Amino acid sequence: MIIGIDIRNIGKKRTGDEVVFFNLTKTLAKIDMENEYKLFTDIIDTTVLQYIGVSLGIDNKKNFKIISLKTKNKFTWNFWTLPKYLRKNLVDIYFTQYITPWFVPKKIKIATIIHDISFNFYPQFIKFWDLFFLKKLIPLSLKRADKILAVSRFTQDEIIKYYKIDSKKIDWFHNAVSADFSAQDISVEKIKAIKEKYKLPSNYILYLGTLQPRKNIPALLEAMALLKLEMTAKINPLKLVIAGGKKHNYDKLIDRAVKKNNLAEDVFFPGYIDEEDKAGVMKGADIFVFPSFYEGFGMPIIEAMSLGVPTIVSDILPHREIADDAVLYFKPEIPGELTQKIKEIISSEVVRDNASRNGKFQAQNFSWEKSARKMLEIFSQMVG
């Protein structure tokens, strides 16, 4: 097969969706010597392209090639730049996410990943123009796609129900902890250096991810304020670290919650964490919290679990699917419940040890190689 993969997000610090395509592509390069791969990007900087090739492990792979297509914006990419190329240079499969390209020959099979469809259930959390294009283009993309791929059973079921998709047209796979993440240095010395680099406190509760409204960060801040009020002199005061970039769809209620609860000295915003430092930042945390209203999967949860960091997550179906009983749960709309779960971990060595041990065990159920092999099976079925 000749397989085209949309790798435009790789190298752009887009967190979750970048991680998925990076790890699937890197794993395919590791396990597949038979099929030919064309990796499409709009990046034209040769230094960056070389770095991407080395990072993916394809710099010496004859069956992998990065193809850089210059474009004005992401819309001209889908509507003109890429289709023009593909009409002259056919591939068997084009693998992308969300929005499929237009005017591509029907003989090219298209597979698209849908990470979540939160915009349908929490439209108030999405910018107007982002919501407009998602509402208009996703249904058309799902119709054009030959295969739709979800990152969890939960998301698969949501897509089937909401868009009335034939179940035969959709499949799912799970994300996993990358080999690069697992190989990172998490020694005491390295963690100390990372804390100094990002100016982190000695003891902290961590959230790491995007800072969009559906991530429910204000509830975490409310829980932190309650915790601060209830702490006694016997309990080590924990600070809160909220790691993630503020550029894309930043939740302005975060700033209001910090000000309202007088948490300016208790909350740290280190910004985007370099990929090579992420494991150290997580391992250095006393507790990891993921309070989202809605997720398709929740990659940081399995990363934290794999490191044995006691983890607390919102009680929503996708979190139950991936974490089972290895974490503590709270209702996302009740900050007081989150406060109580934090106190359980702080005050009980048994709770901490169980959460650490169970998390490590649960994280072993996820593998990028398993997911990449499932991708190859799906691609083979698509081309017959």
Image: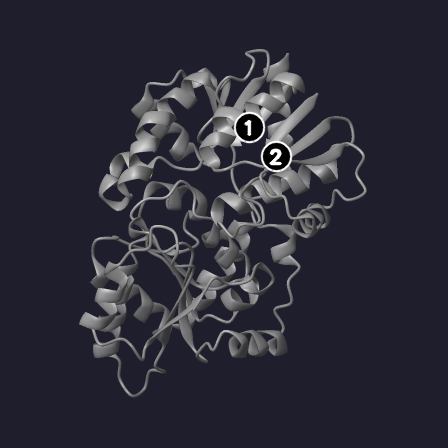
Examine the rendered structure and indicate whether residue 154 appears above or below residue 297: above
Residue 281, given in percent of the width and then of the height, sits at: 51, 68
Q: Which residue is mark 2?
A: 69
Nearer to the camera, 88 or 365? 88
Instruction: Identify the disc placed on residue 81.
Output: 1
Q: How many marks?
A: 2
Crowding at mark 1 (Cα within 10 Å: few <14, some 14-19, many 20+): some
- In which quadrant of the rendered image does the N terminus lie? top right
Identify the residue at image location x=33%, y=18%.
164
- In which quadrant of the rendered image does the C terminus lie? top right
Measured Cα–Cα span from mark 2 to mark 1: 7 Å
- The amino acid sitting under disc 1 is Thr
Q: Which mark is first along the chain, 1 or 2?
A: 2
Secondary structure state at the residue bearing disc 2:
loop
Nearer to the camera, 348 or 207? 207
Q: Is residue 16 left or right of residue 277?
A: left
Instruction: Identify the disc placed on residue 110.
Output: none
Examine the rendered structure and indicate whether residue 149 appears above or below residue 259: above
Identify the residue at image location x=48%, y=64%.
309
Please, which residue is most extreme toward the left here? 260
Secondary structure state at the residue bearing disc 1:
helix
Residue 338, given in percent of the width and then of the height, sits at: 28, 62
Question: Is disc 2 in contact with disc 1, using a CB cutoff of under 8 Å?
Answer: yes
